[in-house]
Image: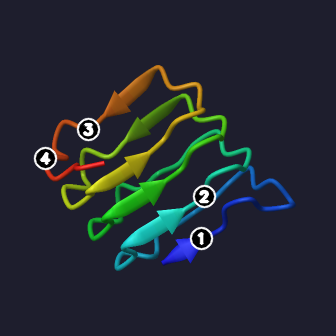
Amino acid sequence: MFDCSYNRENLTALDVSRNGNLTDLGCSWNQLSSLDVSKNGNLTRLYCSYNQLSSLDVSRNGNVTNLNCSGNRLSSLDVSRSGNLTD
């Protein structure tokens, strides 16, 4: 698990592209305007609420069961291949 939620420095960028085995990512309550999780195929939980995200694509993350992206400015959310979502 990697959790950088509630970061006092208010992260504006986060690169997890080299963490292919990452299963849990928590990055809520920051200032992220984009988040690319396309190379994180093992991701099962993604918590990215309360950022500045306008789009989020988890179509390459078929193992995701828990997704919280509330409190963003999403105009696009692709969960087309996320059939395992339960929460």
**2 or 4: tag closer to the N-terminus:** 2
Task: Please provide percent x and percent y for residue 14.
Answer: 63, 59
Q: Quadrant of residue 43?
A: bottom left
**Circle 1/circle 2 CB separation < 8 Å:** yes
Q: Amino acid at mark 3?
A: Val
Q: Residues within 10 Å of mark 1 (few under 14, many from 20)?
A: few
**Residue under numbered circle 2:** 27
**3 or 1: tag closer to the N-terminus:** 1
**Position of 33 relative to 63 (above/below):** above
Q: Residues within 10 Å of mark 4 (few under 14, many from 20)?
A: few
Q: Is 40 situated left or right of 72 in this image?
A: left
Q: Amino acid at mark 1?
A: Asp
**Circle 4/circle 3 CB separation < 8 Å:** no
**Residue under numbered circle 4:** 83
The structure residue drawn at horizontal position 51% and vertical position 26%, both measured from the top left corner, is: 74
- Secondary structure state at the residue bearing disc 2: loop
Q: Which mark is residue 3?
A: 1
Task: Please provide percent x and percent y for residue 9.
Answer: 86, 60
**Residue under numbered circle 3:** 79
Q: Quadrant of residue 78?
A: top left
